[in-house]
Image (tube, coloured by chain):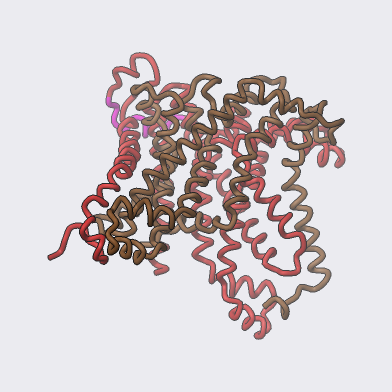
Chain colours: A brown, B red
Amino acid sequence: MQMSMRRSPSGLFFTQAALIVMTLLWISPASWLFMTAFDPAASGAFKLPDGFTLDHFAAVLQRKSGVQFINSMLISAGTATFTVFVAGIAAYPFSRLNIPFKNGILWVLVLLRILPPVAIMIPVFLTARITGLLNIPGVVLALTILNLPFAVLLLKNFFDAVPIELEEAAYMEGATLFQIITKVIAPVSRAGIAVVWFMTFTASWNEFLFPYLLLRTDASFPMSVGLYSAFGANNATNYGFLAAYSVIYLAPAVIVYFLLRRNLTTGFAGVGVKG
Amino acid sequence: MKRLISSNHMWLRNVAGPVTLLVVPCLIFIGIYFLYAVWTAYVSFTDLGLIGRKAIDPSFVGFKNYIRLFTRTGFLDSLWVTTQFTLISAVLGQSFLGLTLAAVMKSPQIRLKPVIEFAFLFGWLVPDIVAAFMWNAFANRDGFLNSLFLGPLGFDSVNLLNQYAMTVIIVANIWKGTAWSYLLFSASLDSVSSEMIEAAYMDGAKRFQRFWYVILPMIKAQIVTNILFVTIWTFSYFPLVWGLTGGGPGRETEVLSIFMYRQAFDVGRLGYGSAVAMAMLITVGFFAIFYMRFLKEKK
């Protein structure tokens, strides 16, 4: 189609110019953030840095923000691992067996995925308060519940694509169920499992509402809540510090995306449901 | 004989029992999720408080919380703020811009595609609170918007978050969310057959006509899907607005999720907060029913 339907030169020029203007607008917050993070005389103003310094980054690593980075890692890796485990072992039977009410259950998962989190916020808080889970393990449990529906749907799609003949062959050779799961299914679906793990990791890494709801002390905050309390609390804002903090905080989310880029379309597979 | 749990495959028949047990942990979690939604519904009929006597000994108040939604100020204002925020930033902003961008970027003559894509994706990938922090600084008196646009145009520099808070959160959300719509539409445009478009071209259809009469009808389902998902998400979106304005100044940008959070955890009225959450849930439910109807018609 392309060769025969070229734009007129002037039309193309305006389209390209409009795109470049939009790109500049879109990238300007990022450019401000990076300029400020390395600027020794950082202020909220939009300007070129006066010099180059890593002091702000050093400050982030020294203070309690270093602990908050570790908290974010614990929450995200914990949630991702737990979610993928529970979802993975459930997605396999959902993919292979005709379980009673299977379609009903899968529809419930789709509905839960679009349920606004505020709808379960109050019970989550009440349970955590009663059971003494106003802490990081409590956040991991809450985020697992939230991420599970999507993870099950995605993993079921992955398993559906794995040919069952492999398992049958192993069974003929005399492999036990446990061996089939660990030696045949797990290696074949490793890529799919990794995608879901990283997606859950990123979602938990970015999550603000539930840690904010359940955690009470600076030392237990993940970076989302740490950043919020740092710029929300005092008016005399230390922009250099906050920008460096932001750069460290956003890096894993951006890097994970570009690692998984090719598998991204699978993320949309879960949007619709295949009955 | 028909078994309760069956499989079309020989080897799985013998192990179907133990394999099915693997579903149990997942069902427990899903059950809790469901139970929580029911629990919220239950709390919404009580006057449960966050602290104090009402926290230990709540009483049943019937529909009082729901009547309050419509008789007291607060909820309806928030609903209006949320509707504006959702319609303008998600439907008009993200979806429309995402579709336009996806359509334009399909042309092989456009240069710098990876750079353009990265700029849009960056906004989407950045965590909500970082976005809130950046836009907070942007809207400052000496921030980007003032020093690069308002200043040169001869306006006095203003604290945009005080004067145009609603505009700032809408712009920030368009900045943040457009990439998602762009990616979805980009994928759906790939599925449109080029023969159809060429045929339309041969018949003399202009560029806009080809888009309007040929391409758009073919991706109608994806457009509806996109609009519904961004609507549902934006309707209950919390962190960006909370981090950027906290609902202020006054209650100008207090979207429903913030109103609900405030009522439940600042004011301490968990019962009333639950009623707000239920109202949000029911609204989203209507969107979902509409969506499923649409999908069924498509089939």
In the picture shown, does residue B245 fall above or below B293?
above
In this rendering, position of residue B243 left or right of residue B78: right
Nearest the viewer among B214 and A253 is A253
In this rendering, position of residue B6 left or right of residue A94: left
Figure quadrant of the C terminus of chain A:
bottom left
Identity of the residue furthest to the front in this view: A173
- Magenta stretch contains residue A125: no
In percent of width and height, residue B90 lies at 58, 49
In percent of width and height, residue A106 lies at 34, 54
Identity of the residue furthest to the top in this view: B52
Q: Residue at x 40, y 53 (%)?
A: A186
In percent of width and height, residue B51 lies at 39, 17
Figure quadrant of the N terminus of chain A:
bottom right
Identity of the residue furthest to the bottom in this view: B203
Nearest the viewer among B144 and A275 is A275
Highlighted magenta segment, given as a residue range: B60-72
Nearest the viewer among A160 and B270 is A160
Q: Residue at x 59, y 54 (%)?
A: A261
Nearest the viewer among B267 and A270 is A270
Q: Residue at x 31, y 59 (%)?
A: A96
Chief secondary structure of the magenta span?
A: helix
Quadrant of the rendered image containing residue B33: top left
